[in-house]
Amino acid sequence: MIPPSEPVPPSNSASALTQFFPGGNFKEAFDEKVVLIVGGANGIGASLVELCCQNGAHVCIGDIDTTEGEALSKKCRDKWPVYWDPALPPKPPRTSFYTADITDYQAVVSLFDRAFRTYKRIDHVVVTAGSMEAGNNWFDQKLNLESVQEPPSTKDIRFQKK
């Protein structure tokens, strides 16, 4: 059951919150990992791309915004270059960008395929892209504090293949 909450007082901060860095060792968590970020050219996705690159990850960016995506990919490659032992095979680039429209299933499949071809694996996938048809409203107008206190259904729905 969700307890009633006290009203949240307004913030007296003069500036908006622009960055949040939770505790933990990001370098250890991301170093040499391959992260595919769908919707990574702008906003939260772009910030995540930079955070991952800064901490040693290789990032494949997929987005419909080619201009911003390519610019971000180049910025990250320049700012956080990949170094390797010349006696060993070269490492893949810090970032790569591929145009991907999430409303096109084949484009998303191609994005994953290109990421696998470039990096030989994918350790994490983050989707920050969203899609909504014009006129659709996904907000449930009936949702309120009382309605979320109702326990969810425990019935199972079972499908059988014939």
Image (cartoon, grey):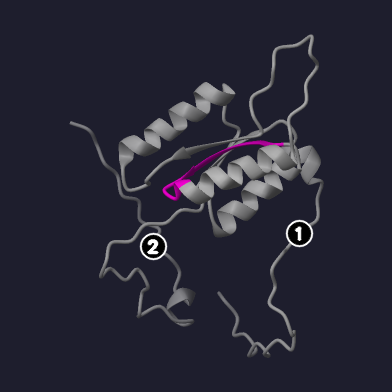
Say whether residue 145 is left or right of residue 134: right
Residue 21: image tag: 1
| Residue at the (80%, 38%) spot, across then down | 28
Residue 129: image tag: none
- Rounded to the nearest whole Å, what is the CA distance between mark 1 and mark 2? 37 Å
Q: Earlier in the sequence, mark 1 or mark 2?
A: 1
Which x, y percent locates residue 39?
49, 50
Q: Is residue 59 magenta?
A: yes
Q: Quadrant of residue 80?
A: top right
Say what secondary structure mark 2 lies in. loop
| Residue at the (80%, 50%) spot, across then down | 24
Against 30, residue 151 (above or below) is below
Stretch in magenta: 57-66
Q: Which residue is mark 2?
A: 153
Observer-nearest of 94 and 5: 94
Which x, y percent locates residue 62?
48, 42
Res 55 visible: yes
Say what secondary structure mark 1 lies in. loop
Which x, y percent locates residue 88?
75, 11
